[in-house]
Image (tube, helix red, strand yellow):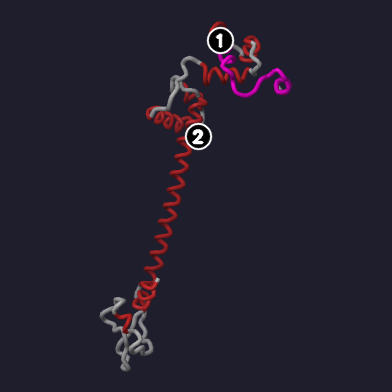
Amino acid sequence: MDKKLSTMSHDPEVRKGPWTMEEDLILINYIANHGEGVWNSLAKAAGLKRTGKSCRLRWLNYLRPDVRRGNITPEEQLLIMELHAKWGNRWSKIAKQLPGRTDNEIKNFWRTRIQKHMKQTESFQQQSNSETNDRQACTSQVSNIAEPMETYSPSCYQGMLEPFSAQFHTNPDHSSSCTNDNTNYWSMEDILSMQLANY
């Protein structure tokens, strides 16, 4: 097997690169007259300076008369997805269920369209889940902060808090300033609401 590969790769007569229209016509005419056969023999017998594999792929994927051209229809796309879920990457087997479509075309469609779309959707869902988790964590932190805490009696800020009293809603049970008799208290909720409003 290695000898065959090494002789083919070092053979100066073997042509590589894009197929010409002349080569296509030679291959089409040869197969029309002699039929398909052993591809290495066919390539030599037809006078093509191509490998048997190159001739086979050119015929099966491009030149065969029953090859369907054009975009894959939504019905074909659904069938491809269904068969891929059933058989995995068995492209030849899937292609047999889609007359005129080649295994190579189906594989390329799967990788460039469906698989790419699935990865983008998965990435979007992960990002969305991450943002949801972040929001939930932030909400739980805020709710923990906003839980009723013990109140304390601040030093008397007589006159200093008056500009803020109109700006912030304070609990009606608590005054926005204190008197010397210590009957008015500020809760932690009041202080946090003032701090959050400044951000």
- Side (left or right) of 36 relative to 177: right
- Side (left or right) of 159 relative to 15: left
- Residue 160 position within the rendered picture, expressed as x and y whole percent measured from the top left: 35, 86
Q: Residue furthest top?
A: 33
Q: Is residue 29 above or below residue 195?
A: above
- Side (left or right) of 169 relative to 89: left
Q: Is residue 142 above or below residue 180?
A: above
Quarter of the figure with the C terminus? bottom left
**As shown in the figure, which amino acid type bears the numbered disc 2?**
Arg
Q: Which residues are magenta?
A: 3-27
Between 88 and 154, the one nearer to me in the picture: 154
Q: Secondary structure at mark 1?
A: helix
- Residue marked by disc 1: 31
**As shown in the figure, which amino acid type bears the numbered disc 1?**
Ile
Quarter of the figure with the N terminus? top right
Say whether disc 1 or disc 2 marks the residue closer to the N-terminus.
1
- Residue 106 position within the rendered picture, expressed as x and y whole percent measured from the top left: 48, 28
Between 66 and 153, the one nearer to me in the picture: 66
